[in-house]
Image: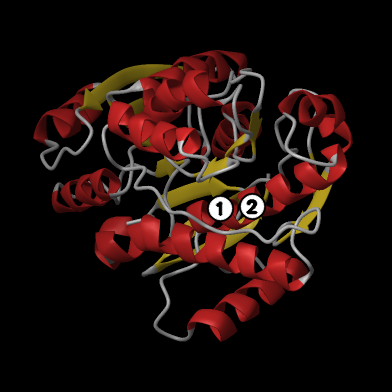
Amino acid sequence: MFGPSCELCAQLAVEELNARGGVCARELRLHVVDGSLPPLRVAYDVERLIEAGAVDAVVGWHISAVRQVLAPRIAGRVPYVYTALYEGGERTPGVFVAGETPSRQLLPAMRWFARERGVQRWCVVGDDYVWPRGTAALARRYAADLGASVCGEEYVPLGSREFDGALRGVEACAADAVLMLLVGQDAVEFNRAFGSAGLQAELPRLSTLTDENVVLASGAANSWGLCSTAAYFQHLSTPESIDFSARFARRFGPGAPTLNSPGESCYEGIQLLGALVEAAGGLDISTMCRVSDAVTYAGPRGELRLRGDRHVEQRVYLAQADALDLTVVGQL
Protein backbone atom coordinates (compact mmCIF):
# COMPACT_ATOMS: atom_id res chain seq x y z
CA MET A 1 0.00 0.00 0.00
CA PHE A 2 2.80 2.45 0.85
CA GLY A 3 5.54 1.13 -1.46
CA PRO A 4 4.65 2.87 -4.75
CA SER A 5 4.56 6.33 -3.16
CA CYS A 6 7.78 5.63 -1.24
CA GLU A 7 9.66 4.51 -4.34
CA LEU A 8 8.61 7.42 -6.55
CA CYS A 9 9.29 10.01 -3.84
CA ALA A 10 12.79 8.59 -3.35
CA GLN A 11 13.30 8.64 -7.13
CA LEU A 12 12.23 12.28 -7.30
CA ALA A 13 14.66 13.21 -4.51
CA VAL A 14 17.54 11.45 -6.29
CA GLU A 15 16.74 13.15 -9.60
CA GLU A 16 16.52 16.59 -8.01
CA LEU A 17 19.81 16.18 -6.12
CA ASN A 18 21.54 14.95 -9.28
CA ALA A 19 20.17 17.91 -11.22
CA ARG A 20 21.96 20.16 -8.71
CA GLY A 21 25.26 18.34 -9.17
CA GLY A 22 24.80 15.33 -6.91
CA VAL A 23 26.27 14.97 -3.42
CA CYS A 24 29.93 15.89 -2.97
CA ALA A 25 30.05 16.00 -6.79
CA ARG A 26 28.93 12.37 -7.01
CA GLU A 27 25.79 11.21 -8.80
CA LEU A 28 23.24 9.30 -6.73
CA ARG A 29 21.81 6.00 -7.93
CA LEU A 30 18.78 4.36 -6.36
CA HIS A 31 18.60 0.62 -5.71
CA VAL A 32 15.20 -0.49 -4.38
CA VAL A 33 14.87 -3.35 -1.86
CA ASP A 34 11.48 -4.75 -0.79
CA GLY A 35 11.19 -3.86 2.90
CA SER A 36 7.93 -5.78 3.36
CA LEU A 37 9.67 -9.16 3.36
CA PRO A 38 10.48 -10.94 6.66
CA PRO A 39 13.04 -8.92 8.64
CA LEU A 40 15.87 -11.46 8.34
CA ARG A 41 15.35 -11.63 4.58
CA VAL A 42 15.46 -7.84 4.25
CA ALA A 43 18.66 -7.70 6.30
CA TYR A 44 20.19 -10.46 4.17
CA ASP A 45 19.31 -8.66 0.92
CA VAL A 46 20.75 -5.36 2.15
CA GLU A 47 23.91 -6.96 3.55
CA ARG A 48 24.58 -8.67 0.22
CA LEU A 49 24.42 -5.31 -1.55
CA ILE A 50 26.79 -3.73 0.97
CA GLU A 51 29.27 -6.60 0.78
CA ALA A 52 29.22 -6.41 -3.02
CA GLY A 53 29.98 -2.68 -2.88
CA ALA A 54 26.69 -1.95 -4.65
CA VAL A 55 25.40 0.57 -2.10
CA ASP A 56 27.07 3.26 0.04
CA ALA A 57 24.10 4.07 2.28
CA VAL A 58 20.63 2.83 3.22
CA VAL A 59 17.47 4.96 3.38
CA GLY A 60 14.08 3.48 4.02
CA TRP A 61 10.54 3.30 5.30
CA HIS A 62 9.87 -0.12 6.84
CA ILE A 63 8.46 -1.44 10.10
CA SER A 64 10.44 -1.45 13.34
CA ALA A 65 10.82 -5.22 13.27
CA VAL A 66 12.95 -4.77 10.14
CA ARG A 67 14.91 -1.86 11.63
CA GLN A 68 15.75 -3.84 14.77
CA VAL A 69 17.33 -6.63 12.71
CA LEU A 70 18.92 -4.38 10.10
CA ALA A 71 20.50 -1.65 12.26
CA PRO A 72 23.00 -3.82 14.19
CA ARG A 73 24.15 -5.44 10.95
CA ILE A 74 24.75 -2.34 8.83
CA ALA A 75 24.84 0.84 10.91
CA GLY A 76 28.58 0.66 11.56
CA ARG A 77 29.33 -0.08 7.91
CA VAL A 78 27.20 2.41 5.98
CA PRO A 79 25.00 5.37 6.99
CA TYR A 80 21.40 4.33 7.65
CA VAL A 81 18.57 6.89 7.46
CA TYR A 82 15.35 5.45 8.92
CA THR A 83 12.35 7.45 7.72
CA ALA A 84 9.34 5.73 9.32
CA LEU A 85 7.44 6.86 12.39
CA TYR A 86 8.33 4.46 15.20
CA GLU A 87 8.17 3.81 18.94
CA GLY A 88 11.34 5.79 19.75
CA GLY A 89 14.58 4.86 21.46
CA GLU A 90 16.87 4.12 18.49
CA ARG A 91 20.42 5.09 19.46
CA THR A 92 22.59 2.85 17.25
CA PRO A 93 25.58 4.90 15.98
CA GLY A 94 25.19 5.55 12.27
CA VAL A 95 21.38 5.50 12.35
CA PHE A 96 19.68 8.83 11.59
CA VAL A 97 15.92 9.06 12.15
CA ALA A 98 13.65 11.26 10.04
CA GLY A 99 10.28 9.94 11.28
CA GLU A 100 7.92 10.83 14.08
CA THR A 101 8.15 9.48 17.63
CA PRO A 102 5.31 9.20 20.17
CA SER A 103 6.39 12.07 22.42
CA ARG A 104 5.95 14.52 19.54
CA GLN A 105 3.19 12.72 17.64
CA LEU A 106 0.95 10.74 19.99
CA LEU A 107 1.13 12.74 23.23
CA PRO A 108 -0.13 16.05 21.77
CA ALA A 109 -2.86 14.19 19.88
CA MET A 110 -4.07 12.50 23.07
CA ARG A 111 -3.98 15.88 24.78
CA TRP A 112 -6.14 17.31 21.96
CA PHE A 113 -8.64 14.44 22.29
CA ALA A 114 -8.88 15.01 26.04
CA ARG A 115 -9.45 18.75 25.58
CA GLU A 116 -11.69 18.76 22.49
CA ARG A 117 -13.52 15.43 22.77
CA GLY A 118 -13.42 14.76 26.51
CA VAL A 119 -11.70 11.39 26.01
CA GLN A 120 -10.73 9.78 29.32
CA ARG A 121 -10.66 6.06 28.49
CA TRP A 122 -8.68 4.62 25.56
CA CYS A 123 -8.65 1.18 24.02
CA VAL A 124 -5.61 0.21 21.97
CA VAL A 125 -5.98 -2.02 18.89
CA GLY A 126 -2.61 -2.89 17.38
CA ASP A 127 -0.58 -5.35 15.38
CA ASP A 128 1.41 -7.68 17.60
CA TYR A 129 5.01 -6.51 17.22
CA VAL A 130 7.40 -3.96 18.65
CA TRP A 131 6.00 -0.67 17.29
CA PRO A 132 2.40 -1.07 18.51
CA ARG A 133 3.39 -2.58 21.86
CA GLY A 134 6.11 0.00 22.50
CA THR A 135 3.78 2.84 21.53
CA ALA A 136 0.97 1.44 23.70
CA ALA A 137 3.31 1.39 26.71
CA LEU A 138 3.94 5.09 26.18
CA ALA A 139 0.21 5.72 25.62
CA ARG A 140 -0.46 4.29 29.08
CA ARG A 141 2.02 6.74 30.56
CA TYR A 142 0.69 9.69 28.56
CA ALA A 143 -2.89 8.85 29.53
CA ALA A 144 -1.95 8.78 33.22
CA ASP A 145 -0.23 12.17 32.87
CA LEU A 146 -3.46 13.54 31.35
CA GLY A 147 -5.64 12.09 34.10
CA ALA A 148 -6.96 9.45 31.72
CA SER A 149 -6.34 5.72 31.26
CA VAL A 150 -5.83 2.92 28.76
CA CYS A 151 -8.61 0.55 29.76
CA GLY A 152 -8.04 -2.16 27.16
CA GLU A 153 -5.47 -3.48 24.69
CA GLU A 154 -6.16 -5.83 21.79
CA TYR A 155 -3.36 -7.20 19.57
CA VAL A 156 -3.66 -9.16 16.33
CA PRO A 157 -1.02 -10.84 14.15
CA LEU A 158 0.50 -8.63 11.46
CA GLY A 159 -1.47 -9.28 8.28
CA SER A 160 -4.78 -9.95 10.06
CA ARG A 161 -8.04 -9.83 8.17
CA GLU A 162 -10.41 -10.78 11.01
CA PHE A 163 -11.15 -8.41 13.90
CA ASP A 164 -14.23 -9.84 15.62
CA GLY A 165 -12.31 -10.60 18.80
CA ALA A 166 -10.69 -7.19 18.88
CA LEU A 167 -14.05 -5.47 18.40
CA ARG A 168 -15.55 -7.46 21.26
CA GLY A 169 -12.65 -6.27 23.41
CA VAL A 170 -13.25 -2.66 22.39
CA GLU A 171 -16.92 -2.87 23.32
CA ALA A 172 -16.25 -4.70 26.59
CA CYS A 173 -13.84 -2.10 27.99
CA ALA A 174 -16.27 0.82 27.59
CA ALA A 175 -13.65 3.11 26.08
CA ASP A 176 -14.27 6.69 24.93
CA ALA A 177 -11.94 6.30 21.93
CA VAL A 178 -9.77 3.79 20.09
CA LEU A 179 -6.05 4.18 19.46
CA MET A 180 -5.30 2.31 16.22
CA LEU A 181 -1.74 1.01 15.90
CA LEU A 182 -2.27 -1.02 12.71
CA VAL A 183 -0.23 -1.08 9.51
CA GLY A 184 -1.59 -0.63 5.99
CA GLN A 185 -4.16 -3.22 4.96
CA ASP A 186 -4.64 -4.26 8.59
CA ALA A 187 -5.93 -0.74 9.31
CA VAL A 188 -8.22 -0.94 6.28
CA GLU A 189 -9.72 -4.25 7.37
CA PHE A 190 -10.20 -2.99 10.93
CA ASN A 191 -11.94 0.17 9.72
CA ARG A 192 -14.28 -1.90 7.54
CA ALA A 193 -15.10 -4.20 10.47
CA PHE A 194 -15.51 -1.19 12.77
CA GLY A 195 -17.98 0.37 10.34
CA SER A 196 -19.89 -2.87 9.82
CA ALA A 197 -20.30 -3.13 13.60
CA GLY A 198 -21.80 0.38 13.65
CA LEU A 199 -19.16 1.72 16.03
CA GLN A 200 -18.04 4.72 13.98
CA ALA A 201 -20.96 6.80 15.31
CA GLU A 202 -20.05 5.99 18.93
CA LEU A 203 -16.26 5.88 19.18
CA PRO A 204 -13.70 8.22 17.63
CA ARG A 205 -10.48 6.61 16.39
CA LEU A 206 -6.97 8.02 16.46
CA SER A 207 -4.18 6.58 14.34
CA THR A 208 -0.52 7.51 14.04
CA LEU A 209 -0.28 5.57 10.74
CA THR A 210 -3.36 6.30 8.66
CA ASP A 211 -2.61 7.89 5.32
CA GLU A 212 -4.76 8.90 2.37
CA ASN A 213 -4.58 5.38 0.89
CA VAL A 214 -5.95 3.79 4.07
CA VAL A 215 -8.89 6.22 4.17
CA LEU A 216 -9.68 5.65 0.50
CA ALA A 217 -9.53 1.87 0.82
CA SER A 218 -11.57 1.87 4.04
CA GLY A 219 -14.46 3.73 2.42
CA ALA A 220 -16.25 6.91 3.45
CA ALA A 221 -18.81 5.16 5.66
CA ASN A 222 -16.10 3.34 7.59
CA SER A 223 -13.80 6.36 8.03
CA TRP A 224 -16.27 8.68 9.72
CA GLY A 225 -14.79 9.87 13.03
CA LEU A 226 -11.28 8.69 12.17
CA CYS A 227 -8.36 11.04 12.92
CA SER A 228 -4.70 10.70 12.01
CA THR A 229 -1.61 12.47 13.28
CA ALA A 230 1.56 12.79 11.19
CA ALA A 231 4.28 15.21 10.13
CA TYR A 232 2.93 15.37 6.57
CA PHE A 233 -0.36 15.04 4.71
CA GLN A 234 -0.97 15.44 1.00
CA HIS A 235 -3.16 18.53 1.48
CA LEU A 236 -0.90 20.31 3.94
CA SER A 237 -1.33 23.93 2.83
CA THR A 238 2.19 25.30 3.22
CA PRO A 239 4.18 26.76 0.31
CA GLU A 240 6.77 23.98 0.54
CA SER A 241 4.14 21.22 0.54
CA ILE A 242 2.18 22.73 -2.33
CA ASP A 243 5.37 23.09 -4.38
CA PHE A 244 6.34 19.48 -3.63
CA SER A 245 2.93 18.22 -4.78
CA ALA A 246 3.26 20.19 -8.01
CA ARG A 247 6.74 18.81 -8.75
CA PHE A 248 5.58 15.26 -8.01
CA ALA A 249 2.58 15.66 -10.34
CA ARG A 250 4.70 17.14 -13.14
CA ARG A 251 7.22 14.33 -12.91
CA PHE A 252 4.91 11.33 -12.59
CA GLY A 253 1.62 12.49 -14.06
CA PRO A 254 -2.03 12.26 -13.00
CA GLY A 255 -1.90 8.46 -12.60
CA ALA A 256 0.87 8.57 -10.01
CA PRO A 257 0.25 6.98 -6.58
CA THR A 258 -1.07 9.21 -3.83
CA LEU A 259 1.38 11.41 -1.98
CA ASN A 260 1.39 10.42 1.67
CA SER A 261 3.48 10.59 4.83
CA PRO A 262 5.49 7.38 4.19
CA GLY A 263 6.33 8.54 0.64
CA GLU A 264 7.23 12.07 1.67
CA SER A 265 9.45 10.67 4.42
CA CYS A 266 11.46 8.76 1.80
CA TYR A 267 11.94 11.98 -0.17
CA GLU A 268 13.18 13.64 3.01
CA GLY A 269 15.36 10.65 3.86
CA ILE A 270 17.31 11.10 0.62
CA GLN A 271 17.57 14.85 1.27
CA LEU A 272 18.80 14.21 4.82
CA LEU A 273 21.39 11.71 3.59
CA GLY A 274 22.65 14.27 1.07
CA ALA A 275 22.92 16.94 3.76
CA LEU A 276 24.81 14.58 6.08
CA VAL A 277 27.29 13.57 3.39
CA GLU A 278 27.89 17.20 2.41
CA ALA A 279 28.39 18.23 6.05
CA ALA A 280 30.78 15.34 6.71
CA GLY A 281 32.61 15.76 3.41
CA GLY A 282 32.04 12.09 2.63
CA LEU A 283 30.57 8.86 3.93
CA ASP A 284 32.57 8.41 7.13
CA ILE A 285 30.02 7.49 9.80
CA SER A 286 31.93 8.82 12.79
CA THR A 287 32.28 12.20 11.08
CA MET A 288 28.57 12.20 10.23
CA CYS A 289 27.68 11.51 13.87
CA ARG A 290 30.03 14.28 15.01
CA VAL A 291 28.50 16.94 12.73
CA SER A 292 24.89 15.72 12.70
CA ASP A 293 23.53 18.17 15.27
CA ALA A 294 24.44 21.03 12.90
CA VAL A 295 22.76 19.48 9.84
CA THR A 296 19.72 21.14 8.31
CA TYR A 297 17.89 20.47 5.06
CA ALA A 298 14.93 21.90 3.17
CA GLY A 299 12.02 19.63 2.29
CA PRO A 300 8.25 19.59 1.74
CA ARG A 301 7.80 20.50 5.43
CA GLY A 302 10.16 23.48 5.30
CA GLU A 303 13.64 23.65 6.78
CA LEU A 304 14.32 20.92 9.32
CA ARG A 305 17.19 20.15 11.70
CA LEU A 306 18.74 17.07 13.28
CA ARG A 307 18.90 17.08 17.06
CA GLY A 308 21.87 15.81 19.03
CA ASP A 309 20.21 12.38 19.33
CA ARG A 310 20.21 12.11 15.49
CA HIS A 311 16.42 12.51 15.24
CA VAL A 312 14.81 15.20 13.07
CA GLU A 313 12.86 17.94 14.84
CA GLN A 314 9.20 17.43 13.87
CA ARG A 315 6.19 19.64 13.27
CA VAL A 316 3.19 17.35 13.61
CA TYR A 317 -0.39 17.84 12.39
CA LEU A 318 -3.80 16.38 13.12
CA ALA A 319 -6.08 15.43 10.23
CA GLN A 320 -9.63 14.09 10.11
CA ALA A 321 -11.12 11.74 7.55
CA ASP A 322 -13.46 13.63 5.23
CA ALA A 323 -15.29 11.18 2.94
CA LEU A 324 -12.40 9.56 1.02
CA ASP A 325 -9.62 11.95 2.01
CA LEU A 326 -7.90 13.53 5.01
CA THR A 327 -8.39 17.20 5.95
CA VAL A 328 -5.75 18.83 8.15
CA VAL A 329 -7.36 20.23 11.32
CA GLY A 330 -4.27 21.99 12.63
CA GLN A 331 -0.75 21.72 14.00
CA LEU A 332 -0.27 19.99 17.34
Question: Which amino acid type corresponds to the residue marked 1 in the rendered image?
Answer: Cys
Image coordinates of residue 18 in percent, x first then y, are 70, 67
Q: Quadrant of the N terminus?
A: bottom left
- Disc 2 is placed on an element classified as helix
Callout 1 environment at 10 Å: few (<14), some (14 to 19), or many (20+)? many
* Residue 25 point in image, percent of width and height: 80, 59
In the image, which is nearer the foreground, mark 2 or mark 1?
2
Of all residues, the one furthest to the right in this rendering is: 294
Placement of 265 over or under 52, stated as above or below: below
Q: Quadrant of the C terminus?
A: top right
The residue where tag 1 is placed is 266
Q: Residues within 10 Å of mark 2 (few under 14, many from 20)?
A: many
Residue 221 position in % (x across, y down): 26, 63
**Type of amino acid under label 2:** Ile
- Residue found 39% across the figure and 48% down from its top: 33
Compared across the picture, whether 233 is left or right of 39 comes to right
Give coordinates of residue 29: x percent, y percent.
57, 59
Residue marked by disc 2: 270
